[in-house]
Amino acid sequence: MNTSDAVIEIDNVEHIYGGTTKALAGVSLTIRRGEFVAIIGKNGSGKTTLAKHFNGLLKPTNTPGAVRLHTKDGRTIDTRNSRLHELASTVGYVFQNPDRQIFHDTCREELEYGPRNLGADDEALARKVSETLELVGLEGREEANPVHLSRGERQRLAIASTLVMGCDVAVIDEPTTGQDRAESRKILDSLAHHHARGQTIVIISHDMALVAEYATRVIAMRKGHVLTDGPPAEVFSQREVLQETNIRPPQAAVLGAELGLRGVLTVTDAVREMRDALHRSPSRPLNKVG
Amino acid sequence: MNGTMLYRPGDSILHRADPRAKIAVIVVVLILALTTTRIDVLVALTVAVVVGLAVLARITPVSYAKALVLIVPLILLLTLLQSLVQSGAAIATIGGVSLSQAGVLLGLGIGMRLFAMGICFYGFSVTTSPSDIALALNKVGVPYKFAYLTSFAFRFLPLLQDEARTLLTAMAVRGSAESSSRHPLRRGRAIVRMLFPMLAGSMKRSGDIALSMELRGYNLPGTRTFYRTLTFRTSDALLLVGLVLLAGLLVGMQWYLPAPFTEGA
Amino acid sequence: MNVDAPALKVTDLTVRYEDADRRALDEVSLEVVPGEILGILGPTGAGKSTLLQCLAGVIPHHEHSAATRGDIAIFGRPIAEFASLSEITETVGLVMQDPEVQLVNTVVREELVWGMENRGIPVPEIEQRLQRAAELFDIAGLLDRFTHALSGGEKQRVVVASIFCLSPKIMLLDEPTSELDPAGTESVMDAIRVLADEGVTVVVVEHKIEELAVYADRLVAMREGRIEAVGTPREVLEGPAAQDRPQVLDIALQLRAQGLWHDELPLSVPAAVTSWHAMTTDSHLDRTLT
């Protein structure tokens, strides 16, 4: 493990709400540059609480607990000692409801807001705005009023408004809630495009099929602990572990596991493995029992 | 989480009292407080309210100590202002400026008045659920649709608060130093920016809420039934009797006792 | 009310909103069987919500900006004969997407009795229906809770219960699980099954195809204001009209196209596993591979 790749270090972080509710119980993990992380878990598992520590929305409630950010220009910041807006250039956060983070009358102004707060210069900014809009599938809509966009488009606008800031890490809370399949894909594709260009991304999501397809790393939470952490294929193959916490892997993965096939995460994997299994000699057992 | 709602469910005497009786208490306390500036009467009223809350609702000054911290400087400020403004014999002279005794008494009096009313409202809010308030208002003659509005407000207030908080936070995570600024003017700018999406959101939502209410018969003509009833019990009658006695005592004080700190009649 | 008639009969329904460049609904005709669970799917803009709003009488009684043509009959009685929205809601209940705007009282118990109070239902009857609903929808423990403090799934369940208390014969649900996590989704699905068990006709617009496929009796696929397919879940999802399918169905369809799937097409993982076992232990398979 190359620790110089670390961008967010969570060190023994605990978080207790209102003096009694332990939402996070001594979690330690590292988010590395270039990852596309999905944090999954049921409500109350601590996934949102964990994500909110990444950009300082929440601070650890225990004294030894620390959240350290390593910026691309070599600085190390402890979130405990920083104000929220000071961390904005390092870790961006997109909230679940786009309508709670859109303030302007045009898409262009909305995208300019963040970078302007960070002191961006006009020339480069205009270009960046166009580029970012294109990458989220809203090309040419600079002058459109967000009110006239569909909910899915507004969600992409909200995501674009954070990605345009060029933060080291972008955290997106439930990017596809309330969206139909086609729109959900567009949103995840937008994230994938940015990821391909080097953006480190963390999403919180309930959509296991999309997580399986787009994420490079899955962190499953349960009762304030990390239940399992690894590539999607590995995490979703641990069915008994996930079952404890009611996380259901995508149907393809479940089917693959039930049929005793390996390496099945997506529909494509399933079709391939099942076809191969059917072409194998019938004398060899095709499916494991139990 | 209760949000802004002060109401805490409980089973103290005041919790179980008929909300109409509690409304009567507030009205009488308000009238008593607003019709005099005599320091002795107002102190007596305040003591009565504090003791009443402690005994009948188990709410001790400890619970509202935080609010006190805000009120005390306010009272001192009021007193200072009045002492400078009012004419009359000086109680003290500081650096050439005389602070009149009448002014000090007036200032303290107004302060105590605020205090008494504030604690009274607080006690009412903590012991009376929003639905009780609406029901009580309706039973004393306020048309249902208006009475219902009070519980409607309590229902949606936490939501608005939540929205405001999220909007301000959303600004901060995009680098805005204003939204979390302690400087009132800068923070004010952030709040203005936040108001537009909030208003737009509220307007859109209110259309849906109106539809939702219509779908459940809100605008139906004809008689409405009430699942809950209010029963005025002996304990409530006793509360009112106690209230009348208190009022009598305080009014009597004003008529028969000379105002303190004055020179003769 | 004619109990032999279809629960809902839509004939050539056409709707166009003011300032819209195309029709929201274009000569839609449909019959809903009493007691069935009918699922409606389609991309955003297909007209699903518009259809539901027409069925509930919201268009035109509440929403005045749409021009409509065509007929709707509720248990044989033309909708035009109903004097007002309130009269329609005695037979047809509507649950909308956002739970937040449908809860208008501070405490759950109040919410449940509110609609009944508005209709002047006598108190003993209110009490009876309240207890029944609390038991059926598993919300007895929530009765004294504040509505704003409930989880998304709990909120929607309370909404469904409170409309159920008004004894509608037909319930329309417009994307009821869209804002909910898997646990919340499941709780609404359970509520829908309860409704169907109680003899209520249910029409539900839903994007979560994997859940819908399993509990719907029939499906309707819509696109751009028109109905493209009507039939059993298997029939509709197998056909070209479906934009989205359960993963297991997708897998089976692809294998079938390669001549490798001979059994019934599955809509769930257990069904897929059963079919697989049937196909791979089938003597037919031995014959084809020698």
Image: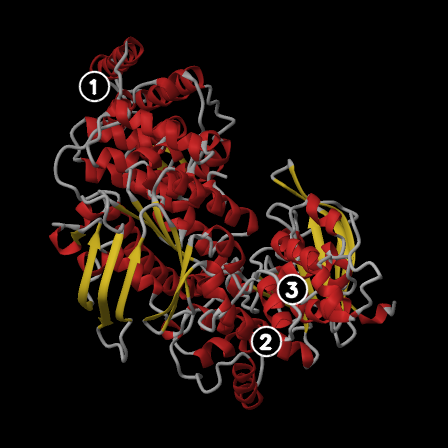
Q: Residue C157 vs residue B116: left or right? A: right
Residue B186 appears in the figure: no
Q: Residue A211 carries which label?
A: 3
Foreground of the two, B46 or B127: B127
Q: Which mark is residue B265?
A: 1
Q: Residue B189 vs residue C128: left or right? A: right
Question: Quarter of the image containing the C terminus of chain B?
Answer: top left
Type of amino acid under label 1 = Ala
Give the Cα separation between the discs numbered 2 and 1: 87 Å
Above-or-below relation of B103 to A83: above
- Provide the secondary structure element on which disc 3 rests: helix
Instruction: Report the residue marked by disc 2.
Output: A189
- Provide the secondary structure element on which disc 1 rests: loop
| Dot 1 and dot 3 within a common chain | no
Please report contact status of discs 2 and 1: CB closer than 8 Å, yes or no. no
Give the Cα separation between the discs numbered 3 and 2: 12 Å
- Provide the secondary structure element on which disc 2 rests: helix
Identify the residue at image location x=26%, y=75%.
Answer: C23
Q: Which chain carries label 3?
A: A
Mark whose residue sits in front, 2 or 1: 2
